[in-house]
Amino acid sequence: MFESSKEMMLEVFASIDFESPITWVTFGVIGLFSLYKFIQKSFDMIEMICNRTYIYNICWEDPAVDHQILKISKDDVIFRICSAGDIVLDYAIEGPSKIVICDMNQHQLYLFELKIRMLRDPLLTYEEWWSIWGSSDSQIAVKVWKRMRHTMSTPARMWWDPRIEKTFRKGFAYSGSSGFAAKFILPWLMYVVGFNLKDWADTGFSHEYISKNYHMIQRSAWWFRRLFPSIIAPFAGVPANQIGPEFYTLEFYENILREIFLDPDFGSNNYFYRFYYDKGYKDQSCCPRTLKKEHFKSLKDNAGCFEWHHATVQATMERVQPYSFTKLILLDHMDWMPNEMVADEWIALQRATVPGAKILWRSAFTKMDDKPFFNNLDIEDMSPQWYSKDRVKMYPGTFLSYMPKDPLPWVDRVPSPCQRASAVRKLSTAGKMILHPLTAGKVNAHGDKMSSFYAAQAKGYDAVRENMLIARPEMMSGFGPIKKGHTWLDVGGGTGRNLHYLRAQLDLFERIVVLDICPELLAIGEENAKRSFTPSQFERIRWVCLDINSPNVRALLAPHLRNDLTRGFDAVTFSYSLTMIPQWEQALESAKSLLSDEGRLIVADFDTYTEKGTSIKDFIIRQWYKQDG
């Protein structure tokens, strides 16, 4: 039986027409499906790649754009995420004082170390440098490696020893996971869509060829839409949590592909994509500055300016001396970070940079407003000016900010001891919330409704609501820089929970006013503040029982602002209180009228589970919070 099955399989195999394009397309589809299933079953495809090799063999940002924006000088101390390391080498040509890099993938640092140790070899010639990194000459690579391998760190030397000859013999352009995608996945895709790269290359990568065959761009976008999020992304170093809704639209891919391939200068100076097509760099006419002969001496002279760390950006910032950096380049890594992580990282960045330091980053998205932290930070969108000039065109968003001199909000998410409660207290408070419709008397005034609902819950309110009002710390992260003498009005602040998020920075405020129409909550808030804060901090806080929609609210609050009716508040917050106010539009207008000239209005509130808000969960949550007034 086994023999007959074997013969049958051989007959089927012999009958396959390997000359037919359909056969290869079929094999490609089966291979991609198998790869997709493999990726799905992997615990973390990117982590698996990073545990074995580097992802990027070249950097995917255009250093020419960086130079135009950053204006690097000899006094600069620069920080950048490493990636393949070639762009920081490009920065080094300008002779900055110091360049610090970091990467979470140890193998990216091994690749960078190989480059920098070669440059520090006093016997290295330009011809050897070009042969290794331009032509991928394995014999020269091994020759130089034997000469300088003793200068490598032990882990890097042990990693490169069995790989140095093979990496350059097989072609450096095909190394790393991005090289794997360039060698195996993308050629199959080009074949499927009918994009003959050789025909295009024979025309000198002409703009006209792509214009006449634009259907290839459209077909490629169709395939990228289906393959990139699930299969290609890990090999390009794009984690799952960076893939937003845009990655599932044809327009996203078509726009990027159109910008790349319809660039009239593609054939003359776009060395990023030519690197993979040519399996390296053919000559100096289309290659990075780091491989041009006129910059080789500067590159070697400045090879000693580097310091590198196997660490996160935040950990690196916490290791260096305070106020070190004048320029920082953060790539696109914040795309995949949650707001809390971004806020914590920027606190560390501020500690490590001089006030006014330039901070440049890129993004797969054209806006940064999905993260509350950025909402009150001055950010300049550089994309309209520079995206068309960026030869990579992989990132639709390019952003620039300057490190504020005033402290960024440090959000302490741990409740103060007085805001915690025993399990019995929590159960009791939750029970009173649930039974309120059955036990409450009939009241009409809004303030009376609030007191009726909250009075019995006041002592356990913060502990019970801590995990329900989840956007409060995110709102506080978007507070923006806090200057000395800041003023803050917290509308519906009740127990003062929001103040405890900024407990470490309360001394910066001149005045904080917690406004609420429920005196029971204000009493608990004042008691908690007295127990938690220093006497000096406590004296800065006022607890005011007042309706934000009161016609004379400005005059009533003026005594808390040195009786200056024109002063206004630098921040007005509504933390899950705006929707509790029947005339909420009026409340917003009233709050806006109370702002200083540069004041910020910050709101966190309830949302729906679904876009239309019509699900069962949405109905239940609306009925629940109706009890709040």
Image: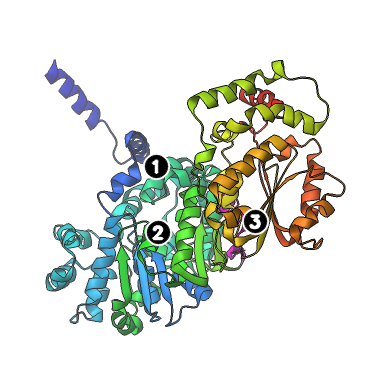
Q: Is residue 118 visible?
A: yes
Q: Position of residue 541 (x, y in %)?
A: 66, 52
Residue placed most toward the observer, 7 or 66: 66
CA distance separating discs 1 and 2: 27 Å
Exactly how many numbered labels are in the figure?
Answer: 3
Helix, strand or loop at mark 1 = helix
Q: Position of residue 6 (x, y in %)?
A: 16, 23
Up/down of 448 relative to 307, above or below: above
Up/down of 199 relative to 42, above or below: below
Q: Residues within 10 Å of mark 2 (few under 14, many from 20)?
A: many
In the rendered view, does 195 fall on the left or right side of 584? left
**Residue 34 lies in quadrant:** top left
Question: Residue 231: which numbered mark, if any?
Answer: 1
Residue placed most toward the observer, 384 or 415: 415
Give the position of the N terminus as an image quadrant.
Answer: top left
Q: In front: mark 1 or mark 3? A: 3
Question: Residue 313: which numbered mark, if any?
Answer: 2
Q: Position of residue 280 (x, y in %)?
A: 31, 66
Q: Which residues are magenta?
A: 366-384
Give the position of the C terminus as an image quadrant.
Answer: top right
Q: In front: mark 3 or mark 2? A: 3
Verify CB contact (< 8 Å) between mark 1 and mark 2. Answer: no
Residue at image position (37%, 39%) is 25
Amino acid at circle 2: Val
Amino acid at circle 1: Ile
Amino acid at circle 3: Arg
Which residue in the protein does label 3 denote?
540
